[in-house]
Image: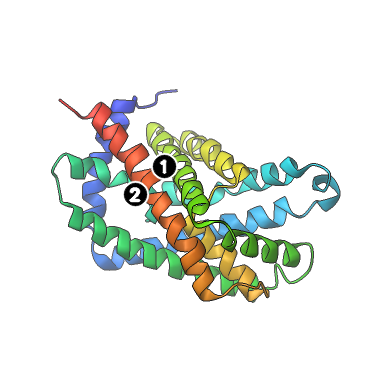
């Protein structure tokens, strides 16, 4: 298996970052809408599979987490292989080239803002049309499960949610780094699979995934307001995701592998 070394991966992100920050705005928006839908697709699959075997998981709580984790990575695999724009992945990918002086932090802020909003739009559109309107979670156990998920996510202590956000995007960006090591579809898919499966099984908080889980729970009747969704979950999860991706993956690898 001919894979890139850690330094070669980090060197490769320089070209990736320059390409992402120089793309036309319309292309960034379209690819980011796709990415939001891809992550929501992984989310609903993890819900259907993870909560679809209550007779097995009721006495084995780790089994539900494992089953959800085994299928959720399809979202990131689609993002990486098809070149979609994902906010949490870009948290790490844009940092090395910035640290090398190829562009400034304003470019990063502009990309992150546009991609974040378009990810939200893609996730919401998929959630409403292809999940809620299609009736995929209308009946139990899915109806009760998504309501419980949404309410639990919005009742986390603020700092706990932030720390769980750090863990989630540390795993996701490590998955992106591993995927960049490979050349074939199988290598890229395997690189995405293991860390993302781990973050789902561990119950970490991913802001783009939560743009699916919490709105769907609200559509199904969860006792969660828009303010609670944004202030109690989305804000701390997003801050944590930036720390986990930009600092713990992008900055650390750039510092270790690109310093003269």
Residue placed most toward the observer, 184 or 4: 4
Quadrant that contains the C terminus: top left
Residue placed most toward the observer, 174 or 144: 144
Q: Mark 1 points at which residue?
A: 173
Residue visible at 24% across and 31% down in the picture: 255
Q: Mark 2 points at which residue?
A: 91
Residue placed most toward the observer, 58 or 81: 58
Is 226 placed left or right of 222 in the picture?
A: left
Q: Is the Cβ of the residue at disc 1 closer than 8 Å to that at disc 2? A: yes
Residue visible at 64% across and 60% down in the picture: 152
* Relative to 239, residue 30 above or below: below
For label 1, count other residues whose C-alpha is less than 10 Å away and answer few (under 14), some (14-19) or many (20+): many
Residue 176 place in picture, x, y as percent = 41, 41
Is 180 placed left or right of 36 in the picture?
A: left
Is 190 placed left or right of 94 in the picture?
A: right
* Relative to 31, residue 81 above or below: above
Residue visible at 27% across and 59% down in the picture: 111
Is 15 placed left or right of 129 in the picture?
A: left
Q: Determine the residue located farthest toward the right in the rendered image.
A: 55
Q: Which of marks 1 and 2 is nearer the N terminus?
A: 2
């Amino acid at each position: 298996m001919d894979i890139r070394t850690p330094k070669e991966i980090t060197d490769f992100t320089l070209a990736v970052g320059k390409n992402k920050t120089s793309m036309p705005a319309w292309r960034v928006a379209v690819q980011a809408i796709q990415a939001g839908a891809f992550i929501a697709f992984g989310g609903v699959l993890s819900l259907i599979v993870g909560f679809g075997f209550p007779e097995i998981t009721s006495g084995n709580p780790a089994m539900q987490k494992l089953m959800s984790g085994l299928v959720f990575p399809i979202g990131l695999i689609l993002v990486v292989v098809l070149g979609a724009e994902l906010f949490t992945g870009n948290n790490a990918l844009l940092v090395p080239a910035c640290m090398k002086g190829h562009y400034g932090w304003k470019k990063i802020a502009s990309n992150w803002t546009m991609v974040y909003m378009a990810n939200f739009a893609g996730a919401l559109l998929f959630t409403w049309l292809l999940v809620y309107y299609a009736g995929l979670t209308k009946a139990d156990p899915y109806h009760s499960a998504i309501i419980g998920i949404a309410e639990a996510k919005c009742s986390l202590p603020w700092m706990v949610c932030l720390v769980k956000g750090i863990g989630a995007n540390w795993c996701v960006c490590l998955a992106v780094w591993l995927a960049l090591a490979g050349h074939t579809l199988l290598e890229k898919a395997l690189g995405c699979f293991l860390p993302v499966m781990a973050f789902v099984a561990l119950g970490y908080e991913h802001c783009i995934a939560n743009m699916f889980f919490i709105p769907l729970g609200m559509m199904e009747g969860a006792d969660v307001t828009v303010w609670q969704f944004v202030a109690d979950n989305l804000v701390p999860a997003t801050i944590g995701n930036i720390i986990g991706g930009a600092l713990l993956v992008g900055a650390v690898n750039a510092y270790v592998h690109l310093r003269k």
